[in-house]
Amino acid sequence: MAETLRIALAQLNPVVGDVSGNVARVRAARAQAAAQGADVVVCTELVLSGYPPEDLIYRAAFMDAIEEQVHALAAETADGGPALIVGSPWRKDGHSYNAALVLDGGQIKAAVLKHHLPNYGVFDEIRVFASGPHPGPVEVRGVRLGIMVCEDMWYTDVAETLSETGAELLVIPNGSPFELDKGDERLSHAAARVKETGLPLIYVNQVGGQDELVFDGASFVLDADCALRHRAPSWQESLTVTEWRKGPQGWSCVPSTLAAEGSREEQVYQAMVLGLRDYVGKNGFPGVILGLSGGIDSALAAAVAADALGPDRVWSVMMPSPYTSDDSLEDAAEVARLLGCRLDTVNIIPAMTAFDQMLGSFFSGLPSDITEENLQSRARGVSLMALSNKFGPMVLSTGNKSEMSTGYATLYGDMCGGYAVLKDVYKTMVFAVSRWRNANTPAGALGPQGAVMPDRVITKPPTAELRPDQKDEDSLPPYAVLDDILERLIERRQHLSEIVSQTGYESAVVERVWRLLNRAEYKRRQAPPGVKITRCAFGRERRYPITNAYVGPR
């Protein structure tokens, strides 16, 4: 029986659908681990297909390609190097499973099939996978490993079965998307499994962006006494070889590095950076283009883009109208200067004049209203899309979650774009994250050291500048109040009466926000994807019908 074991945690960033590329990533991780004397390499959930693969699982050719690559990878383990535990889709008896495959000695030694398939929030694995039976331990290098695939760790039954059938160490390959405060939840479930079984636990999580989802990594090891023995860095690929020793009480991990977690503001910022970097990179865009208004949303979006891609791949465009203030022109120019990114100006007054002429006979005698305001926003959207079409960069939209929640955004105008990096970030968090970025340079950032926007951008009252002296709070409650109500409606799913009783807000204010939220559903359906930050992001998680006559009880 083994008395020592060296287990490598391979926290990788796969690309969905890039089977050969993902296998190459696993192969490189195994070679690196072998050079460090590892016995076993644990990779993440569905690392060979990328996670989540969604309806690619229905394509027989895709599954064939995976099986071919798995057999080739298994054959390579005959070289005497480390065993591999890799996440992969797997077919068995006419069904497709989410599996952890154990490759060792030149063969596929075992296929551990995921039992609990998540069907909530961003997950719908029941749609494409069958549920596997309760797994038993797999002996790898003389140690009985209890392998649980991601969601199986969140329940008691799988760990209990593994413990009762002789597992010595729990190993969990994961594809767990980031959301605020989820790290504590993961640790809580992991600690519960450790306490129930008395077994140490290895948790290996994916890193990287995939459409709306971003995976933060932060893999960790808990000893049998629930002590945290290792935590990998968040937001970046890593490979760590952990040392294990067997004593009278079982296996124990030698203490290793504990990467810092970072503040909430840092986590939000890093999630946006990684989500945008991978969305642009994995989809092959040369860079991004965005409207830089002099306001805080576009300034923060530009800063995220510069840190994600480098300033040379960020093209900012100021698009003034007669209502654009000198302060906004100065602030936009200063943001571009601080970031070191390109700034050009496209004056939209000729477009406004052309629309007035085109539609003048229809609008004659009618007062100006939101129609003319929206035409300004749409002129800007058309301009950005034209530059995108001509030169190639993806349009980055700059709207935040407060705006998306209430419909305070213009379809085919400021909602125009290929990706909405602030889509799941409330306005109050936009302010907090902007202040954080001005005071900190995040690890791995490709943008400048130091401040990325002038203080005035953060302190001045937010405005769309679509009419004289316009302020956001002319149309919306103060953002501190608005965001609190929205968070209670969306993330907590509280009733209106409950919000009023708990906060003391006027019932009319809460009712108005609720109505704005419901009426804007049709706009959100047409919005670009954006990084998931909160527990309930629009799109994959909050799914309300557009045609919806339900009005109460509220």
Image (cartoon, rainbow, N blue to C red):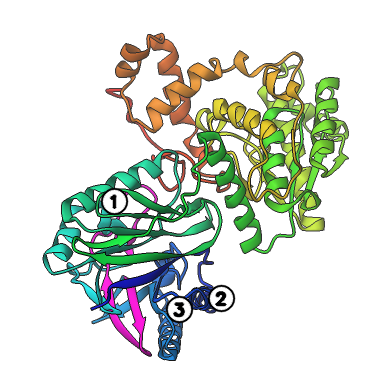
Q: Report how far apart the C-alphas of labels 3 and 2 lie in the structure.
A: 14 Å
Could you say where residue 294 lies in the image, as x and y percent from the top left?
77, 29
Q: Which mark is residue 62?
A: 3
Q: Residue at x 29, y 51 (%)?
A: 190
Circle 1: residue type: Ala
Q: Quadrant of the C terminus?
A: top left
Q: Earlier in the sequence, mark 1 or mark 3?
A: 3
Tell me the SS state at disc 2: helix
Q: Nearer the viewer, residue 471 or 87?
A: 87
Is residue 519 among the parts visible in the rendering? Answer: yes
Displayed quadrant of residue 503? top left
What amino acid is at disc 3? Phe
Q: Nearer the viewer, mark 3 or mark 2?
A: 2
Residue occupied by mark 1 = 190
Q: Residue at x 52, y 66 (%)?
A: 14
Q: Secondary structure at mark 3?
A: helix
What amino acid type should be assigned to the residue bearing mark 2? Gly
The residue shown at (17%, 67%) is 134
Q: Is residue 116 magenta?
A: yes
Mark 2 or 1, nearer chain start = 2
Residues in magenta, as a range: 99-127
Which type of secondary structure does the marked residue at label 1 adopt? helix
Residue 21 image label: 2
